[in-house]
Image (tube, rainbow, N blue to C red):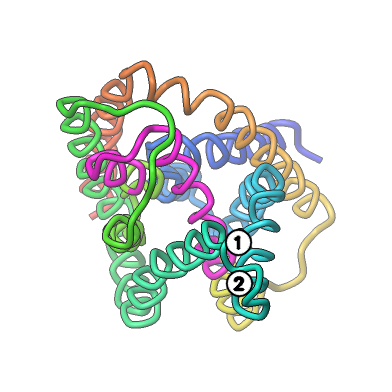
Amino acid sequence: MNLLEAIKYIILGIVQGITEVLPISSSGHVELAKALFNMQEDKALLFLILVNTGSLVTLTTIYFKRLVKMVCDFFVYVFRPSKREERASGFLFAVQMMIATIPIALVGFIFKSKIEALVQSYGVLVAGLGLLLTGTVLVLFTTRKIRRGYTGINYADAVLVGMAQAVALLPGVSRSGMTASTAIFRGMGIDSALNFSFMLYIPASIGSIILYAKDAFSEGLGVMESSQIFYYVLAFFAAMVSTYIAYKFVFNIFRSGKIRYFGYYCIIIALFAIGVGLVQF
């Protein structure tokens, strides 16, 4: 085992976990890391599966009770008419989650190959442009009056937040940044917006991991050394832990109004990524 290689994968896992929760785009940072570390495409794909799964495990654990209640409320509402009144709110939330998931499923299904071709040809450059969009949205976000606490969500909110999540299929566009900002622009309170955003991440992440895994195994992963497996395990757990830590801070960051600093950061890292992309060509 090479200590420097192990540290590299731990750092990459930490970056994934932090950037998945904070509004600074995990996909953009992964594309930049692939370029800087010169990761082979098949190894990068497997790495992406593992670190995304690490973040997914953490957020699923955090929201496990809410998810179970939502699913139970949905099925009880459908199959037990006598219980519908007391289960209505959970059923409604489940329907809104499904509505908000439709855009990313459609965009992913229809444009998956085109997005992949674009990323394969101009990966870090596209990521830089996506980060630039993310940074601009976050800076504009701070000009709006922000509501605190919990508020309701309607069907229009679900559709628009879902469309914002679909845009984040492009590398560099922050999923949490776009969904939370859209929800807050719509008048949702910070807590409701962030919770809806992170819960919406779970089905989207499961779908993307399945697609990543399908591509990885169809391309063939080859024989991996035990040391390489160990590096990936380190990255997986680093992503889990850093996702949890970032989650603990993200609500206060949004409440404090300091989100614009993340916008400035995205703009700076975007210019760097664009520079790297131009050098590659």
Q: Look at 53% across and 23% down and name the residue there.
A: 249
Residues tagged 1 and 2 counted as in contact (Cβ below 8 A): yes
On residue 135, the disc is none
| Earlier-in-chain disc, 1 versus 2 | 2
Callout count = 2
Residue on which the image places disc 2: 77
User: Does the stretch in magenta take in 221?
Assistant: no
Q: Which quadrant of the figure contains the C terminus?
A: bottom left
Q: Look at 36% across and 26% down and name the residue there.
A: 148
Q: Quadrant of residue 218?
A: bottom right
Q: How far apart are marks 1 and 2 (CA)?
A: 6 Å
203 displayed left or right of 154:
right
Q: Look at 56% across and 63% down and name the residue there.
A: 85
Residue 3 x %, y %: 75, 32
Residue 231 x %, y %: 74, 46
Q: Which amino acid does label 2 sit on?
A: Tyr
Instruction: Tell which of 134 and 42 is nearer to you.
Output: 134
Residue on which the image places disc 1: 87
Residue 162 x %, y %: 34, 61
Could you tell me which secondary element the residue under label 1 belongs to? helix
Residue 151 x %, y %: 39, 39
User: Which stretch is magenta?
Assistant: 179-208
